[in-house]
Image: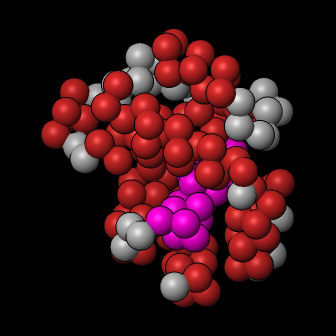
Amino acid sequence: MNAAIPEKSAVEKNPRTIAREFVVQFLYQCESEKLMHFSESHFTQFVQHFQVPSQVVAMARELARGTLEKLPEIDAKIQAVAVNWKISRMSVVDRTVLRLASYELLESETPSKVVLNEAIELAKKYGAEESSKFVNGLLDKIAHTIR
């Protein structure tokens, strides 16, 4: 997955939507580099290199840091609902989207429906053809166990 600046229509998007997109890219990069803890210097380099808009940097940092700090708990939630799937066997994109959305379901006040819709859109954009259905199915189960 190549990290990319969101398309022009991103100007019309909610800042949190833009932050989520960059966080998925950052988490993907972390996994590719086997850096599964939050590193401020790594995040800063990512922000500078991909010119993350200043108005979303704090949101992106919060989401990335929280997701990585709660990774064992998040992975346990995902694994609990992923019948016949091991997290390690999921695509990196699906796993990354699931982790970010699970973190938001666990820790934010964002309505579940919003979190699920945003995650499905990210899966459609960055994942395989069936990613959005896979992500939707697992997140729906997670949302019901959390909220």
Q: Is residue 27 magenta?
A: no
Q: Is residue 34 left or right of residue 120?
A: right
Residue 17 x %, y %? 34, 47
92 vs 136: above or below: above
Quarter residue 24 falls in: top right
Residue at 51% from the left image edge and 62% from the top image edge? 104
Magenta stretch: dominant secondary structure: helix
Residue at 76% from the left image edge and 78% from the top image edge? 80
43 vs 16: above or below: above
Q: Nearer the viewer, residue 81 or 99?
A: 99
Q: Which residues are magenta?
A: 91-108
30 vs 68: above or below: above
Q: Is residue 94 magenta?
A: yes
Q: Is residue 138 left or right of residue 78?
A: left
Q: In this view, which residue lies farthest toward the top?
A: 49
Residue at 23% from the left image edge and 43% from the top image edge? 13
Q: Is residue 94 left or right of residue 89?
A: left
Residue 131 x %, y %? 55, 57
Residue 85 x %, y %? 79, 69
Residue 112 x %, y %? 42, 74
Q: Nearer the viewer, residue 2 or 33?
A: 33
100 vs 133: above or below: above
- Evaluate whether residue 32 shows in this view: no
Split into 4 quadrants, where in the image is the N terminus?
top right
Residue at 70% from the left image edge and 47% from the top image edge? 68
- Evaluate whether residue 92 shows in this view: yes
Quarter residue 137 falls in: bottom right
**How is the model colour-coded?**
secondary structure
